[in-house]
Image (cartoon, coloured by chain):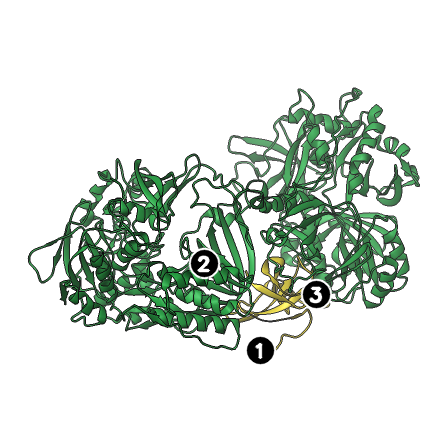
Amino acid sequence: MLLVPCPFCGPRPENEFQYGGEAHIARPPDPSAVDDDTWAAFLFRRNNPKGLHAERWCHIHGCGRFFNCLRDTLSDDIVATYQVRQPRPQVS
Amino acid sequence: VTQVFRTPNGGRIRRDRTLSFTFDGRPYTGCEGDTLASALLANDVHLVGRSFKYHRPRGILSTGVEDPNALVTIDRSGRRVTPNLRATGVDLYDGLQAYSQNCWPSLRHDFGAITDRLSPLLSTGFYYKTFMWPPALWRRLYEPIIRAAAGLGRAPSEPDPDRYLHQFAHCDLLVIGGGPAGLAAALAASATGRRVILCDEQAEAGGSLLAEPDAVIEGKPATDWLAGTLATLRAAPNVTLLARTTAFGWFPDNFLGLAERCTDHLAMPDPHLPRERLWQVRTREVVIAAGAIERPLVFPHNDRPGIMLADAARTYLQRYGVQVGSYAVVVTSDDSAYRAALALHRAGVTIAAIADRRGEANGPYPAAARAAGITVRTGTSVVGTTGRLRVNAVRLNNRVAAIPCDAVLMCGGWTPSVHLHSQSRGRLRFEDTIGAFVPDTISARGYSAGACAGEFDLSRCLDAGYAAGETAARSRGSTRHFEVSGLLTCSPGTLGTDVEPHDKAFVDLQNDVTTKDLFIATSEGFRSIEHVKRYTTAGMATDQGKTSNLNVLASVAGFVNQPVPSIGHTTFRMPYSPVTFGTLAGAARGALLEPVRCAPLHDWAVAQGAIFEMAGMWKRARCFPRAGEDMQRAVARECRAVRESVGLLDASTLGKIEVVGPDAAEFLDRLYVRNISTMAPGRCRYAVMLRETGFILDDGIVARLAQDRFHITTTTGGAASVLHHMEDYLQTEFPELRVWLTSTTEHWAVISVQGPRSREMLTPLVEGMDLAAMPHMSVRDCRVGDVQARMFRVSFTGELGYEINIPSAHAPEIWHALLASGARLGVTPYGTEAMHVLRAECGFIIVGQETDGTVTPDDVGLGWMIGKDKRDFVGERSLQLADMRRRDRRQLVGLRTLDSHIVLEEGTQLVAGGDRQSLGHVTSAYWSEPQQQSIALALLSNGRARIGSTLQAISTEATIDVAVVDPSVRTLRPKTIAVPAAPHAYRSLPSVDHATTAPCPEVTLTMLPAVTRLSVRAGAAAATTLGRVLGVLLGSVPGRAITSRDRAAMWLGPDEWLVLAPVDTGLAQRADASVGGLLASVVDISHHNAAIEVAGTHATCCINAFNALDLDLRVFPVDGCARTVFGKAEIVLWRTATQVFRIEVARSFAPYVGACLEEARQEFLGETSPRRR
């Protein structure tokens, strides 16, 4: 069970969290203005990197907040967590 | 005479405490402190089992968990039968009954041994190569007979009667292994005051020191040093010692699984105690002191009973007081076997010879052996052994005559137990000097010390353990030297085998893998050691190759002519040794498998003899049969009552969310397909909510209570996912909207009153509002009896209908008032089945039944909901995609069977004429009483255009003609004249008082009385104002509650508090009124939760049986609070005093949480419970 550092509550056990898929996929501000391909990409196309992955988590059984998380998919190490709508942190 | 091979003195067993046991039905005796293996050896029983594949007679190889041969079944009678236990790990108790495995009719005469004669035909891969055809025999012969001939013990077939528990624990340092290195590490760390857990898989800690009569540590005999060290550790309040506890798995973030065997060593276990406990330990640092495992040597016929590991023989002698034979030959490639030979020699065992594979052996121990007169032959190996059920002679390569003997003691060196280091993703390197892999770089915070790091000298093990403990505890890093005398230096053994491929030289004893099998695998082209393992099965099964892995590597390396390191090693996976399913499942089975949620009127429904069904976790009354009725008749009667007069449904399970804030209407506009902002306060709308993909997520009623406050309902199963979906959009896509969401699902009980006479029945009970003036799809506040209620005029039946929302605790009294008031109208409670029929008669959909995640609003005929002027809402853009507008999409239609009495099966496929192409499927099907006709709803390709046509429904038995009709065409009025129902007497149920559990100082559970609970969401400015009205500050420190006299505010999130106060039904309104223009949401959820107090010295231990938080006072102090997970329920945990916790839990989860706590508390109720610190 991972220990997930919630930006609001601090490190808490993984079973309090829900995974929410890749982060930084912005909903087009005016969906009617984008073509079908762009919309389909927004809905379905996701990265599946080996290594660092920015992803959404929700502390659903804790403070209820969504936040973003930079996790290494190879080692399962969580490198950083940050609030929604903040830019992805630069990690060396 | 029993125990003829027991020595007169020495060892740690209690010769004055004799224990009786049986093996295969024969009675024997042993002593307290024995394992089953040592007791059997004391009685000269070496033959203990038959091997997996060839049914060869096998004996005890070792003293520990690694033993591949000595697998037995322990029968505690009744349902307590455990197969595949290693006799070396079974602690003897009085009355123990053990049985050998994999033999028939007896261990000595095993029919299956014929496979040994056939072994030339049964080489590796034979099963895959031979039994390929004809396919007809796969299921008749190959699988049931040939495959079944191989095997280990039999799995029990009855449910397990024992209890199992989990325990979450946190520490600064976990020490794995209680041998010299582990003890030294714990000693170092305990002095720093940090939390230390030391676990050891054996009955007592000590490891090699338990068989160390010669060594002197720091001037004390090893036994005394051990006793003193353990006493020091036991006295330290910050140290927890766990015996019989195996660290079996290492998971990310220093989270380790430990399996504790609590009662298997007891003759008469207290039924209050758990049999096994899974410790889930989160630790900052780990010291791995897992020791090393002695390796067998590979030579022809090396598997006979009586052939065992040399140091194991010494351990049996010096720890258990057992001689493993009287005339032994020692074969070795390691000095430690000389030490064993000397010890046995001094105890009176004749050592016929020591045969050393190595060219020379000149260390202190070989010299001592020669000095003792023992014949030592270097450059010598074994070429064969004889003896059917026990070895009786050995042939050496440079001697023609065989040497008679009754024991062969072998040692092929030592293999460090690097399993956990490797599981933690640490790397390994091959150490030539000891011929084994040792830990190299670490990737988690785990430090290997002692024999598991390749260090076999006692003094250096102690020093290294202490240093590792110091490092892990991050103190000054001082070192300590442990002076050891009395032992000689051992030069380590070498790895290697000089056996040509031989079909009786066993490399892996548990799986009967020989050097010949490995040779075949390599000659057939297998190179990767992982492939060789899977092809030959070497290293698989219960022992996971603990004694065989390196010999496999050495053999393969020899056959492909490469050095061992280039072959690599197989992956070390958890579990280190077998863990029972009971341990992994813990308490989560039977009633505690998952919560069963019951609505507030559940007890009443039970008293009426209702039939129930599960809807997700909810248990709902399906119908209420009266005497002599079957379910069909009961449902027909209930439906008829709603159509003719009035019926009552407990609809409390509906999800409810209160949406509050100035932008609430705008937010709901974006979430629902319908316009919500155009709706006036006091009105309701039915609407569906889509996923972004355009498919229906959920449906429900949206009611506007005020300009900035909505009460929305969700389906029973959708409550949690809809709230999560809405929070997701609110927090991540529309953060500019000022809205708060609060679940009120369990605060409100909902009684649905449906039928033409519903208003007539309700009018006398309702105050403060004119029912007659209430339009369809509206909501009003009112009073029902003395209870403040929210009245909805809505219908899911097509009849005049109302849904009364009342605080949950009042549900029974209102329900009884309604039954009394409606008695003269024949008011009839109805269940979910009648609800389904009634709505299907109207063509109303149920999300999850008519929808499956691929259905759009238009598909189910709800396209009209989407206003022409409706702007962007979630899912809108996807509805414009070409595929979503295809004409042949499956659309909702009604079906009528031409033979009106056939009720279709849900899921039946629909076809046209003789065509076999499915056009759609039946989603709901019922008998409709008023129509005297079977009805169904279906999703049908281009369905609306097919209305009026006839199709065929294909079931497994028949093809049924069905007419496609408009789903909403209905005849609701019965064709027959209604007969007035006779008044029916409903049984009432005395209310159950949740009392305090039987008191015990360790843990007492108490149901706490009702309070007012408010869910408060507020920005900083409003929080200050609200605090004044509420009488308690809304604090900003995460995870802290603030208390003020009789009230408390718990911080649950950055803008969320749970406020508790003495019962005050007006508090929410006063608070809400006080905020004025400030941003805040106050929602009364008084009835949403129940509260349980857990108090006592072991309260944390009970809570941590189901909850993973660290409840140490320094981490979770008094007034610490958190929303968290308890088993499979969500709770809010608040520490109100050092040893007192309050658990706030949604009322339907309270029985589950209470039962879990009661289960965790059981072990403190027994008279013999060992108190855990």
The percent coordinates of residue B738 (x first, y second) are 80, 63
Say if B764 sits above or below B844 in the image.
above
Q: Chain of mark 3?
A: B
Residue at disc 1, secondary structure: loop
Residue topped by disc 3: B732
- Quadrant for the C terminus of chain B in the image: bottom right
Residue B439 pos. (x, y %): 39, 70
Say which residue label 2 marks. Answer: B247
Output the chain of dot 1. Answer: A
Which residue is outermost to the left?
B400
Indicate whether B1053 appears above or below B849. below
Q: Taking the image as drawn, is residue B153 in sight?
A: no
Q: Amino acid at mark 3?
A: Thr
In the figure, the green chain has which letter?
Answer: B
Chain A colour as displayed? yellow
- Give the CA separation, mark 3 to mark 1: 23 Å
Say which amino acid is labelled 1.
Answer: Val
At x 82%, y 25%, the residue is B823
| In the rendered image, the vertical position of residue B481 relative to residue B152, given as above or below | below
Disc 2 residue type? Ala
Marks 3 and 2 belong to one chain: yes
Mark nearer the N terminus (3 vs 2) = 2
The picture places residue A64, in percent across and down from the top left corner, at: 69, 60
What residue is disc 1 on?
A91
Q: Secondary structure at mark 2?
A: strand
Question: How far is the residue under mark 3 from the one under mark 2?
Answer: 42 Å
Crowding near pointer 2: few (<14 within 10 Å), some, many (20+)? many
Between the residue at mark 2 and the residue at mark 1, the CA separation in whole angstroms equals 34 Å
Between B940 and B675, the residue placed more toward the observer is: B675
